[in-house]
Image (cartoon, rainbow, N blue to C red):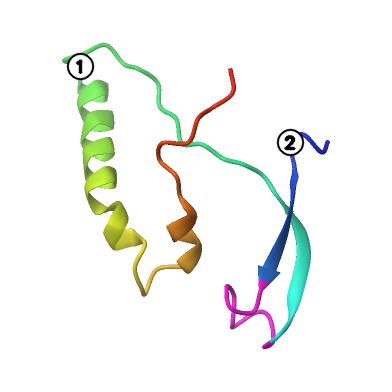
Amino acid sequence: MQSDYLPSVLKAEDYPSLIPPGGRVDTIAVPAILAAYNWPAKTERYRKVEHFVQVFFDRLKYLQQPPFHPKRKEAVLGAPLKG
């Protein structure tokens, strides 16, 4: 289980409306990825995935700014994946 779940902490700075100042909640974290099927080029589904990826990458910096949640700043688009 320890290879899949990592120790983590939720802090008041991260969730001020849920955790009182100076408080913390010990928890676990699960690494996550966003993946999509590689549809054949020039198909409608390929075009939709391509459009999403382009818009997502173009707007990620915007999504990492307030009023969006500060945890979005921790996204690493170039992180290596095992296997």
* Residue 81 coordinates in the image, percent (x, y): 54, 27
Lower position in the chain sequence, tag 2 or tag 1: 2
| Circle 2 or circle 1, nearest the eye | 2
The question of residue 68 being in magenta is answered with no
* The residue stretch that appears in magenta: 11-21
Asked whether 41 or 60 is in front, the reply is: 60
Which residue in the rendered view is the most extreme toward the right?
1
In this picture, residue 61 sits left or right of residue 10: left
Q: Residue 4's mark?
A: 2
Helix, strand or loop at label 2? It is loop
Q: Is residue 55 above or below residue 1?
A: below
Position of residue 30 in the picture relative to residue 7 (left or right): left
Q: Quadrant of residue 36?
A: top left
The kind of residue tagged 1 is Thr
Marks 2 & 1, CB-CB < 8 Å contact: no
- What amino acid is labelled 2 in the image? Asp
Q: Mark 2 Cα within 10 Å, few/some/many (few <14, many 20+)?
A: few
Q: In the rendering, at what x and y percent does residue 53 appear?
A: 28, 37
Q: Nearer the viewer, residue 66 or 74?
A: 74
Q: In the structure shown, which secondary structural element does the residue marked by tag 1 occupy?
A: loop
Q: Mark 1 highlights which residue?
A: 43
Percent coordinates x, y for residue 18 in the rendering: 65, 79
